Amino acid sequence: MKKEKVGWKYKLPFLLLVIVVLFSLIPVEYTNIADAGVEINKADTAWILMASALVLLMTPGLAFFYGGMVRYKNLVSTLLQSFVALGLISLLWIVVGFSLAFGDSLGGFIGNPLTFAFFRNVGVAPNPAFAATIPFALFAMFQLKFAIITPALFTGGLAERVRFSSLMLFIVLFSLLIYAPLAHWTWHPEGFLRKWGVLDFAGGTVVHISAGFAALSGAIFLGRRKGVKETKPTNIPYIMLGTGLLWFGWFGFNAGSALAADGLATTAFVNTNIASASAMLGWLLLDGAIGKKRSAVGAAVGAVVGLVAITPAAGFVTVGQSIFIGFTASMVSYFAVKYKSRTNIDDTLDVFPCHGLGGIVGMILTGVFAKDVGLIYGNPTTFLYHMLALVIVSVFTFGGSYLLYVFTNIILPLRVSSEQEEKGLDITQHGEEAFEFHSK
């Protein structure tokens, strides 16, 4: 068989990686802030080390959650589309991503790309501007896990028809031009949304709304899958396993965002569990109330929606309010999924109805219930800024993502051919199958 010629577009990424690897050998200086009298708290450090590992586990969990929902011929592809972010974003974060998100603020909109490039000035001493009791490098690694799972989330909207190499390019562009600025706006002390008083405890805005709109714009750009109206899950046990890993990891996602082993972390931990439970039961019981069988997939999706919705509010609300937030988000997402099936938008795994709208509900209700500053406490300012921020973030993430899809498609076509789509992405993109059966 004649060997296929490999074009420069496919050689260039490897050459860029080689350059990064060689460049990383250049010595950089690290600032030891501990000399100024800032000490590491061992309990806080131990907890954030564990929380970082928990959040990392969410991405393989998401891979199983998504993988179980697609058709068998696209199972490996869907798993890898999530899993690859572990490697791709990790290196990107070290090189420049962390600096763009948390480097010296340039007008409250973006970080200086040189401040922490290649982890320059990111040592094992605390940086009081971000986290006063844990090593700054640990803070950077904790934030990395959020940057990893965000692109993994939006791949669900593009599943079963996107070219893998093109997706990797889009993930890089999205992380640098959408995620990093949004993280800076929201979480950097000088970010303009943070200065407005916009609250996002653990990523409802930065992670879930951005991923939801990226999935929606991608689904619109790519168009519907060929000849597909509705598909049944390939592997429901995978979905349940993925949900369990996500729920488990989400305790690090939310409670870890307190950046300390304290009462705030405990509040976030409790609210995370209760909101998810409320959302799961709401989804299941609504199925029964309208005459449908209560499904395992429904329970799994409902639980994840509750986790998404409580994320921005986890440290700011009471247990009772977390029950309300989880249930409300579950109802909104439930009917959004039903409505989406009547449209021509093929968001394969309902990323926008579940993650996008779940994050939006959470953001709005954070502005309503946030302790002392929410609408119910007689303070409309926070709520109004949340609504303004929602408009800005929605336009930025949807419009920005769509433009990046257009740009990516010019360099590398995003959609696979009709023949490849028919055969399945596992074979045509990766040369693998999920299971190999041998006849005796």
Image (tube, helix red, strand yellow):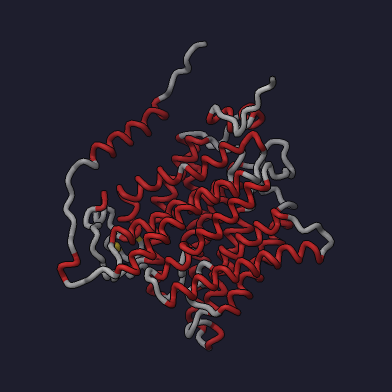
Q: Residue furthest front?
A: 440
* Relative vertical location of residue 24 with respect to residue 277 in this rendering, above or below: above
* Relative vertical location of residue 128 with respect to residue 163 in this rendering, above or below: below
User: Split into 4 quadrants, where in the image is the C terminus?
Assistant: top right
Can the viewer see residue 224 in this picture? yes
Q: Nearer the viewer, residue 409 or 282?
A: 282
Can the viewer see residue 402 in this picture? no
Q: Nearer the viewer, residue 45 or 294?
A: 45
- Give x and y (percent) for residue 307: 57, 64
Residue at 71%, 55% in the rendered image: 296
* Left or right: residue 386 compared with residue 299: left
Q: Quadrant of residue 359?
A: bottom right
Q: Residue furthest right?
A: 291
Residue at 58%, 28% in the rendered image: 427
Q: Residue furthest top?
A: 1
- Give x and y (percent) for residue 102: 32, 61
- Give x and y (percent) for residue 429: 54, 30
- Give x and y (percent) for residue 16: 32, 35
Q: Quadrant of residue 358?
A: bottom right
Count of numbered circles in the view: 0
Residue at 54%, 68% in the rendered image: 272
* Left or right: residue 119 compared with residue 375: left
